[in-house]
Structures are given as structure tokens and as C-alpha cells.
Amino acid sequence: MPEAFPGDADTTVAELRRNMAAFVEERQWRHFHSPKNISMALAVEAAELLEHFQWMDSEESRHIDADAEKLAAVAEEIADVVGYSFAIANELGIDLSQTIRAKMVKNAQKYPAEQFQGRHELGQDGKPVG
């Protein structure tokens, strides 16, 4: 990763969204940035991210950082996914911080830690199996 840029601890979501908006505006691409087009581009980028992990088992995927070139390629795909997420949020006026926090509250209610800790199997009723 380039160290020339500020990291997560020093960068706000708003700053990154402004960067994406400026990038789009400078190229006069806004007319291409309908929610439909951005969501399709986002799906393509997510598939490109997935491709880096194709045929790996779970443990191999946890150690992708051992290959600097592979890690850099994965990081670029993640940047594309997040960048398009910022672009669609910009286009639709969605406040990402509020939306993510609200979704985490909803997920915590749906999947209480005391019931779902260490579990991923769900029955038809949505409750942990076993």
C-alpha cells in the first residue's frame, strides 16, 4: 500500500466520498452514474474480488497477505467495490455512516451474540441449529 496517503485512522468517509464525487465530476461521468449502472459495476467489481479467492480453501484465503502482489491486487478490487459503494451513495444521497450503524443495530437484534456466538448454521426458523 502506498504510504503517501493518509490511512483509515486519519481519513473520513466524507472525504472519500468527496474524492469519488470529484473524480466523477472531473471526467463528466455523472450522466453515466445512474443507480442501475453503478450497481451493475459494483457487482462486476465484487465478482473480480471473488475471483482472487476462487478455488482456495478458507485457510488459504486467510493467508493471502503472504503474497504481496496478490494482496495488492485484492486491495485494488476492494477499493473498486468501496469506490462504487461511495458513488451510489453519492448518487442516492445515502448517509453511509448512519446506514451502516443502523444496519449493525438491526443485525445485533436479529443475531444476538449470546445465541449466535461461534455459530453459522441456521434452521428454517432462523434460529441456530443444535
Image (spheres, rainbow, N blue to C red):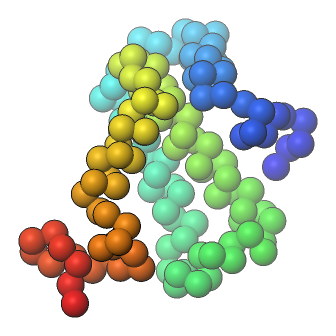
Residue lying farthest to the left in this orientation: 125
**Left or right of residue 79: residue 43:** left
Which residue appears at 63% of the width and 76% of the height? Answer: 62
Q: Position of residue 13 (x, y in %)?
A: 60, 29
13 or 89, nearer to the observer = 13
Q: Position of residue 51 (x, y in %)?
A: 51, 64
8 or 91, nearer to the observer = 8
Which residue appears at 42% of the width and 79% of the height? Answer: 118
User: Can you tell which quarter of the image residue 103 is in?
Assistant: top left
Q: Position of residue 91 (x, y in %)?
A: 41, 18
Residue lying farthest to the bottom in this orientation: 130
Number of marks in the rendered image? 0
Q: Position of residue 55 (x, y in %)?
A: 50, 80
Which residue appears at 54% of the width and 40% of the height? Answer: 82
Residue lying farthest to the right in this orientation: 4
Residue 43 lies, with reference to residue 35, above or below; the image says below
Residue 28 lies, with reference to residue 5, above or below; the image says above
**Left or right of residue 126: residue 6:** right
Which residue appears at 25% of the width and 57% of the height? Answer: 110
Residue 9 visible from this viewpoint: yes
Name the quadrant of the C terminus. Answer: bottom left
User: Can you tell which quarter of the image residue 12 is in?
Assistant: top right
User: Can you tell which quarter of the image residue 35 is in?
Assistant: top left
116 or 84, nearer to the observer = 116
Residue lying farthest to the front in this orientation: 114
Residue 27 visible from this viewpoint: no
